[in-house]
Image (cartoon, rainbow, N blue to C red):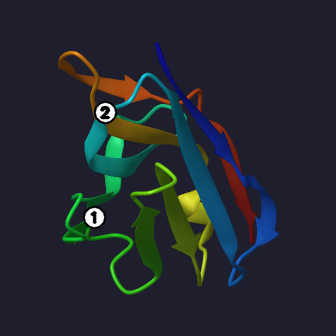
Amino acid sequence: QVQLVESGGGLVQAGGSLRLSCAASGSINSINAMGWYRQAPGKLLEMVATITRGGSTNYGDSVKGRFTISRDNAKNTVNLQMSSLKPEDTAVYYCYADVHTYTVQGYWGQGTQVTVSS
């Protein structure tokens, strides 16, 4: 089995910064794409940022220039550095990983709350 465990969420004032981390563990051969998604109350799940194993990144329009995704392939971790946070960034943030075990399957973390106060 594979588990993704997120950490780093919390309460921050607008304009502040937070860093989210996600660690994958279990019977992992390799991890392809990893990413962060978020869901605000009453809204659909939104892609925040993704990163390939080779380091190519993609960002949602609302976070470009403010958030930075990175990963450590050796440690099976992915991070999201969030800066210039806005109240509209308030959401539950979920880590995602496309994991190769004996097959290829997507896994999700349990989510971590990020709250940005105005």
In the displayed structure image, the side of residue 97 where residue 6 appears, left or right: right
Q: Is residue 110 above or below residue 79?
A: above
Disc number for residue 60: 1
Amino acid, disc 2: Asn
Q: Which mark is residue 29?
A: 2
Q: Where is residue 92 drawn, in percent x and y?
A: 58, 40
Q: Residues within 10 Å of mark 2 (few under 14, many from 20)?
A: few
- What label sits on residue 114 in the rendered view? none
Q: Mark 1: which secondary structure?
A: loop
When asked about the image quadrant of residue 53, the answer is: bottom left
Residue at 29%, 32% in the rendered image = 99
From the image, state whether disc 2 or disc 1 is nearer to you: 2
103 or 86: nearer the viewer: 103
Q: How far apart in space, not on screen, are marks 2 and 1 (Cα)? A: 29 Å
Toward the viewer: 41 or 68? 68
The crowd level at tag 1 (other Cα within 10 Å; few <14, some 14-19, many 20+) is few
Q: Amino acid at mark 1?
A: Gly
Q: Residue at x 43, y 64 (%)?
A: 71
The spot of residue 17 in percent (x, y) is 69, 78
* 8 horizontally vs 59: left or right: right
